[in-house]
Amino acid sequence: MPSRSKNIAYLGIMLALAMIASYIETLIPVFVAVPGVKLGLANAVVMLLLYRKGWRTAVVISFLRIVLSGFLFSGIVMMVYSFSGAALSIIVMVLLKKSGKFSVVGVSVAGGVMHNAGQILAACFFVENAKMFYYLPVLIVSGILTGAIIGILAGILIKRLSQF
């Protein structure tokens, strides 16, 4: 059983990796043609934690990353959108993982789609316009694509890091 200090150091590294991934996404406009679409690199860290350390740890690191990245890179408004997307995403990913019927890629794809759906819900609430849902099909497609990419990456990380 790893010592408490080793576990804290490991989680600190995971948080730092998630923040670096968030920062990289602010520098590289991956999908310039579709506003608001990002690859979600930090979600690879969340997926790794979900499968290696459990849902509680994944939730804590995800939300800490959102708060810290929000203050450093994007601001309060984007933090609220990220929270709403991450909350819905994590709930669905935890449930699908627990079911045992979905692969890492499947869980990640569902998480990507739900993250986008959560952000649309937040946008509808703040903008007070249900027409924001017209943008949902575009975000569903992007959630599927980016979720698959991140799921493949997370699957590789989970396998490679299982020896540590």
Image (cartoon, rainbow, N blue to C red):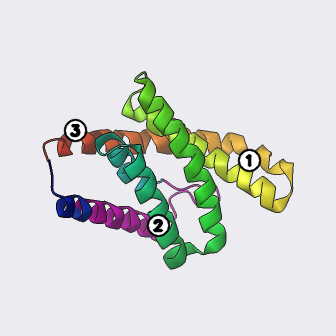
Q: Which amino acid does the dot numbered 3 rest on?
A: Lys
Q: x, y (%) of residue 110? A: 53, 36
Q: Residue at x 67, y 70 (%)?
A: 77
Q: Which amino acid does the dot numbered 1 rest on?
A: Tyr
Q: CA distance from mark 3 to mark 2?
A: 28 Å
For disc 1, the neighbor class at 10 Å (few under 14, some 14 to 19, many from 20) is few
Tell me: 4 left or right of 147: left
Q: x, y (%) of residue 94? A: 47, 37
Q: Nearer the viewer, mark 3 or mark 2?
A: 3
For disc 3, the neighbor class at 10 Å (few under 14, some 14 to 19, many from 20) is few
Q: x, y (%) of residue 138? A: 67, 44
Q: Is residue 147 visible?
A: yes
Can you tell which mark lies on residue 135?
A: 1
Q: Identify residue for label 2.
A: 28
Instruction: Determine whether the residue tagged by mark 1 lies in a helix, strand or loop.
Output: helix
- First reached walking from the N terminus: tag 1 or tag 2: 2
Total marks placed: 3
Q: Residue at x 55, y 44 (%)?
A: 89
Q: Which residues are magenta?
A: 10-39
Q: Residue at x 33, y 46 (%)?
A: 48
Q: CA distance from mark 1 to mark 2?
A: 22 Å
> Toward which corner of the image does residue 141 lie, by quadrant?
top right
- Residue 11 vertical placement versus 46 (above, below): below
Q: Which amino acid does the dot numbered 2 rest on?
A: Ile
**Residues marked 1 and 3 touching at CB (< 8 Å):** no
Q: Is residue 36 visible?
A: no
In the picture as drawn, the residue positioned furthest to the top comes out as 101
> Toward which corner of the image does residue 47 lie, by quadrant?
top left
Q: x, y (%) of residue 75? A: 60, 75
Tell me: 111 left or right of 141: left
Can you tell which mark lies on residue 159?
A: 3
Q: Is residue 35 magenta?
A: yes
